[in-house]
């Protein structure tokens, strides 16, 4: 256990692209090389020195005091004499004078998001763990402050691009990377996490993973079972699942559910009696005749010209469906565009999410993961492809993935990574009932392979539910006791979806 004295001298989801002609910063993949990781890395003999620091959240918002340092690791785990990189590590000290020897850590999604920023954004949710434990934060290699693999060429490419432009941007991205993208996959990242645990002297870890972070968390459990005390997985990506066509199919299922719920809620049904038909009308109109707009950019405030096309509508609907609060806006923004020709809400939301995606995700690391762990495992029959064509997102995403990943170098992947994970550890599975990318059935899929697990489905909620209702208290109790039988999750049933907005003033009284 690390000393309490002062040390000397941070998803899916996954937010993915929706349309090739709007934003192509998405799930991408090529063939991958096989890596069989050692069961345990070589133990570290020296502790990791930390200094006082201040952590900030997404977009520079939020501040948390911590102790920070870096751990030097080999970029290629099989070449200890080759290039290295610095893993950014932060510790939030426990309030206890005698903290437990098992720290709590969290793993962000994306892939490509910073776990340190996620903690700061949700620090209120995780504060209960500090009563008895340290909180250990690591920016996964390629993200945050751990040699981020940034791709300015992809981020800044014209929104209305074609696949040839995408190929050019991908090549430029690869040339600009400050690192070898083959070594930024999940199989390598879990070795990093174990090296940090050993360097910090923690006996075990209690791990929370969200979205893609659930893949990392479960693979760490597979590789280093003795290093895990408890596991919480929120918005589950099953190990055997390859994210691809299912993204559009799941999104369509969620949108169909929104239309159905509007019909069932009297205020929404009365205000928007032709909601689904109006969405289809709006889709056809924007595909045929994009709208020229000039509007204040929602992030910079600058007047921005925008040719509003169907892609902007698709990405707006897809990402608004991630949370119940923003889902509540979907009927109103459709109706505003169809009946009042007010396209500003769609344009504003589209510009905002495009900016946020580019800021929050390191796309070099994102591509390295997706092009190693998803696309090579696509195996779609005619029935799936036909279903895909019927979705509002369509099949263009697969074209984007193939174009980007045909150029991406082979990554390292453990030979058993895509196999179902069997485990006896205490595991708490969290799902949102209306999650548009990792639906509850994914949680059920992994539940069947765990012998000491419990699945909590949050009614009316979307993607990533740990901050909802009583769940912060439940997960704290779970980590404290590691006893699922003593966990009463009935309080979650008090959650519900946010009522639909019927006008700009909000829901009906």
Image (cartoon, rainbow, N blue to C red):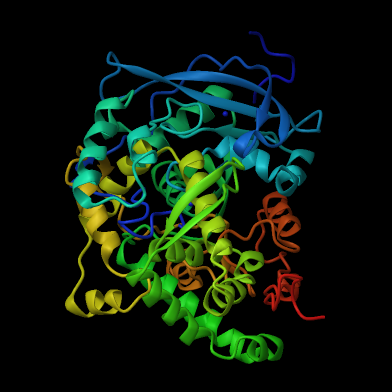
Q: Residue, x 20% and y 43% (percent of image)? A: 167
Near-viewer residue (353 or 342): 342
Query: In the figure, residue 333 lies in which quadrant?
Result: bottom right
Point out residue 375 in the picture as x, y percentages from the top left corner: 25, 54
Residue for point 43% across, 66% down: 314
- Quarter of the picture containing the N terminus is top right
Regarding residue 203, the answer to whether it shows in the image is no
Residue at image point 23% right, 79% down? 386
User: Hey, which quadrant is residue 456 in on the image?
Assistant: bottom right
- Residue 104 x %, y %: 63, 40
Task: Identify which residue is drawn at 64% across, 72% down.
Answer: 328
Q: Position of residue 10 (x, y in %)?
A: 57, 29
Residue closest to the eye, 509 or 101: 509
Q: Is residue 52 above or below residue 292?
A: above
431 relative to 94 in the view: left or right: left
Which of the two residues, 201 or 496, is positioned nearer the viewer here?
A: 496
Task: Measuring from the top left, give residue 494's x and y in whole percent.
Answer: 75, 75
Q: Does residue 7 appear left or right of residue 161 in this picture?
A: right
| Count of marks, rendered view | 0
Asked whether residue 366 is in view, the answer is yes
Q: Is residue 215 above or below residue 322?
A: above
Q: Is residue 253 above or below residue 122?
A: below
Name which quarter of the figure residue 203 lies in.
top right
Image quarter in which the C terminus is found: bottom right
């Amino acid at each position: 256990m690390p000393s309490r004295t002062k040390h000397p001298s941070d998803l899916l989801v996954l937010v993915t692209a929706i349309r090739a002609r709007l934003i192509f910063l998405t799930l991408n993949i090529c063939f991958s090389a096989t890596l069989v990781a050692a069961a345990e890395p070589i133990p570290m003999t020296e502790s990791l020195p930390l200094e006082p620091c201040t952590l900030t959240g997404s977009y520079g918002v939020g501040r948390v005091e911590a102790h920070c340092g870096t751990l030097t690791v080999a970029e290629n785990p099989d070449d200890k004499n080759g290039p290295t990189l610095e893993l950014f590590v932060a510790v939030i000290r426990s309030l206890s004078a005698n903290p437990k020897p098992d720290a709590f850590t969290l793993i962000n999604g994306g892939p490509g998001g910073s776990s340190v920023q996620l903690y700061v954004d949700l620090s209120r949710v995780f504060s209960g763990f500090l009563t008895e434990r340290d909180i250990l934060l690591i920016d996964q290699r390629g993200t945050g402050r751990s040699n981020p693999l940034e791709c300015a060429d992809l981020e800044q490419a014209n929104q209305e691009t074609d696949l040839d432009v995408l190929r050019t941007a991908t090549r430029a991205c690869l040339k600009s990377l400050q690192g070898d993208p083959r070594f930024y996959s999940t199989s390598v990242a879990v070795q990093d996490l174990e090296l940090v645990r050993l360097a910090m002297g923690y006996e075990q870890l209690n791990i929370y993973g969200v979205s893609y972070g659930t893949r990392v968390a479960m693979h760490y459990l597979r590789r280093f079972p003795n290093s895990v005390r408890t596991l919480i997985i929120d918005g589950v990506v099953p190990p055997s699942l390859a994210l691809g066509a299912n993204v559009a199919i799941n999104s369509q299922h969620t949108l169909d559910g929104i239309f159905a719920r509007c019909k069932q809620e009297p205020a929404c049904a009365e205000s928007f009696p032709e909601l689904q038909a109006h969405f289809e009308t709006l889709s056809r109109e924007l595909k045929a005749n994009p709208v020229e707009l000039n509007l204040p950019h929602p992030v910079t405030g600058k007047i921005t010209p925008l040719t509003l096309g169907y892609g902007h509508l698709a990405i707006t609907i897809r990402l608004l469906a991630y949370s119940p609060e923003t889902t509540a806006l979907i009927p109103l923004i459709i109706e505003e565009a169809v009946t009042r020709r007010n396209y500003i809400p769609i344009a504003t939301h589209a510009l905002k999410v495009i900016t946020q995606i580019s800021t929050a995700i390191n796309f070099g690391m994102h591509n390295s993961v997706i092009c190693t762990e998803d696309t090579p495992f696509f195996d779609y029959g005619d029935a799936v492809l036909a279903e895909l064509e019927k979705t509002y997102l369509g099949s263009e995403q697969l074209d984007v993935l193939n174009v980007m990943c045909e150029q991406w170098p082979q990554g390292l992947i453990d030979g058993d990574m895509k196999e179902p994970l069997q485990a006896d550890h205490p595991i708490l599975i969290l799902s949102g009932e209306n999650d548009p990318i990792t639906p509850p059935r994914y949680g059920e899929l992994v539940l069947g392979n765990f012998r000491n697990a419990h699945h909590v489905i949050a009614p009316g909620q979307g993607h990533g539910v740990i901050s909802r209702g009583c769940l912060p208290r439940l997960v704290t109790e779970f980590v404290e006791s590691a006893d699922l039988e003593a966990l009463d999750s009935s309080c979650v049933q008090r959650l519900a979806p946010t009522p639909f907005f019927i006008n700009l003033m909000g829901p009906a009284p």
